[in-house]
Image (cartoon, rainbow, N blue to C red):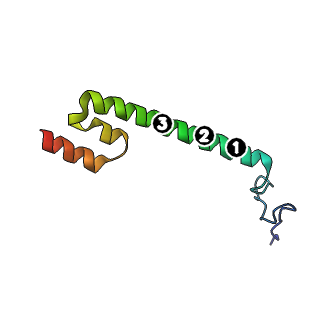
Amino acid sequence: METAQYCATCQAPLNPISGYSRCNPLIRGAQRITGALEVAGRRTRRSWAGICGILVGGFGAHKFILGYTNEGIIQIVITS
């Protein structure tokens, strides 16, 4: 059985596959990029939801885009 190896900087256990810990600058950079992409995706989705809410708001299409499925179904049933 192997003993866990630890980072000399942050004392966190090293990932057995990559050999890096969470404090590695490459991993931190990748996390920043991934986080930025997620934020951009949310902004895009909210923009589309806003456009749909203005154009066909009565049908609840914007609710589905934002992931509010139950509220979207309720709005369709009420407006039908």
Q: Residue furthest top?
A: 55
Location of the N terminus (image quadrant): bottom right
Front residue of 49/8: it is 49
Q: Residues within 10 Å of mark 3 (few under 14, many from 20)?
A: few
Measured from the top left, where is residue 3 in percent x and y? Answer: 82, 71
Q: Residue at x 75, y 58 (%)?
A: 15
Instruction: Tell me the quarter of the picture where residue 47 sits.
Output: top left
Measured from the top left, where is residue 59 in percent x and y? Answer: 21, 35
Instruction: Tell me the quarter of the picture where residue 26 sits.
Output: top right
Query: Where is 11 relative to 73, above or below?
Result: below
- Regarding mark 3 in the picture, which secondary structure is present there? helix
Q: Which mark is residue 36?
A: 2
Q: Is residue 29 left or right of residue 7?
A: left
Q: Amino acid at mark 1?
A: Ala
Q: Residue at x 34, y 29 (%)?
A: 51
Measured from the top left, where is residue 6 in percent x and y? Answer: 83, 65
- Regarding mark 1 in the picture, which secondary structure is present there? helix
- Regarding mark 2 in the picture, which secondary structure is present there? helix
Query: Where is 34 relative to 14, above or below?
Result: above
Q: Residue furthest left?
A: 80
Instruction: Tell me the quarter of the picture where residue 61 sits.
Output: top left
Query: Where is 37 relative to 7, above or below?
Result: above
Of the two numbered discs 2 and 3 on the same chain, state the one appearing first in sequence.
2
Q: Which residue is mark 3?
A: 43
Q: CA distance from mark 2 to mark 1?
A: 10 Å
Q: Amino acid at mark 2?
A: Ala
Q: CA distance from mark 3 to mark 1?
A: 20 Å
Q: Which mark is residue 30?
A: 1
Of the two numbered discs 3 and 1 on the same chain, state the one appearing first in sequence.
1
Q: CA distance from mark 2 to mark 3?
A: 11 Å
Q: Which mark is residue 60?
A: none
For marks 2 and 1, give the one nearer the viewer: 2
